[in-house]
Amino acid sequence: MTRLSKLGFVWLVGAGPGDPELLTLKARRLIETADALVHDALSPVEVLAWARPGAELLDVGKRCGRACRPQSEINALLVRLARAGRRVVRLKGGDPLVFGRGGEELAALAAAGVPCEVVPGVTAAVAAAAAAQVPLTERGLSQAVLLATGHEAPDLPGRVTRWADYAKLDATLCIYMGRRRAAKISAELQAGGLPADTPVLLVAAAATAEQQILPATLGTMAAVAEAAAPSAPLLIIVGEVARSPGEAGPRPAGKPVARAAALALSPA
Ligand code: SAH
């Protein structure tokens, strides 16, 4: 009996922030032709509907509060599917290699000899800036951007985030997963030298119908974070770029910027 030894392929595909129109053409083509789609809680549902009939849809969502599938199991699942000859799309919210543990998946695939490719996606910081219409860099205001996580991994106790050092970078800070530690982050950034009136924008569920843009300052950002829809993913932008163009001082906390109203997703 001939044994089929055809090895499959895994694509780590960025699903972007939520709007299905923000996926790349390549991502769409791969989703439409994949044998199996392994997706997260943050993958837009509309996108899953692009899968061909008969494709296997596997939800390995790992959002806090829901059942968590250990990363090692996800890695093993990808390897198993590829070894069964499947063309696998591993769909990840935003960009697969920004706070998505995509690196660990790549390492597991490489160790197992599974061929793979990464298809980039629009990461939340970029989507949030676009939603709020603020530049992440601007001549004379900010020459650098830092993508930082507000979540400290409990299994990596030595790896504390050095907010007081980040405060000295003179860069725009884009904080992912920062809602629960917003008060601590704000206090540490201030301890590092950033003034309490440093402009901040909180963008919840960027590029979705639930999008909220909440202006704040470093001093008020924790309280304003509380006002954001609790289940929406939240991106916090800290720095001078977060100030409205032409605005002389910091905006009052918690009042949506005027332009936000006009920024609801355009109707399909
Ligand atoms: N790989 C993803 C990030 C995953 S970490 C990316 O590149 O965007 C999950 C965090 O990303 C969330 O807690 C939130 O901070 C941020 N995030 C993801 N989607 C978002 C969205 N639509 N709006 C605002 N923040 C978002």
Image: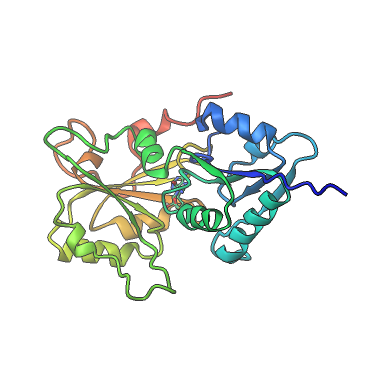
Q: Is residue 224 above or below residue 206?
A: below
Where's residue 242, x and y in %? 25, 41
Q: Nearer the viewer, residue 65 or 38?
A: 38
Q: Nearer the viewer, residue 86 or 245?
A: 86
Residue that protrudes farthest toward the front in the picture: 1
* Residue appearing at x 22%, y 37% in the figure: 137
Where's residue 184, x and y in %? 29, 67
Q: Is residue 240 left or right of residue 222?
A: left
* Residue appearing at x 62%, y 49% in the figure: 39
Q: Is residue 243 above or below residue 191?
A: above
| Image mark count | 0
Q: Is residue 209 left or right of residue 238?
A: right
Q: Is residue 15 above or below residue 104?
A: above
Q: Nearer the viewer, residue 255 or 119?
A: 119
**Observer able to see residue 50:** no
Where's residue 155, x and y in %? 44, 74
* Residue appearing at x 18%, y 35% in the figure: 247
Q: Quadrant of residue 43?
A: top right
Q: Quadrant of residue 261?
A: top left
Q: How is the image coloured?
A: rainbow
**Observer able to see residue 44:** yes
Q: Is residue 98 above or below residue 138?
A: below
Where's residue 74, x and y in %? 61, 59
Q: Nearer the viewer, residue 111 or 70?
A: 111
* Residue appearing at x 52%, y 53% in the figure: 110
The quadrant of the image that shows the C terminus is top right
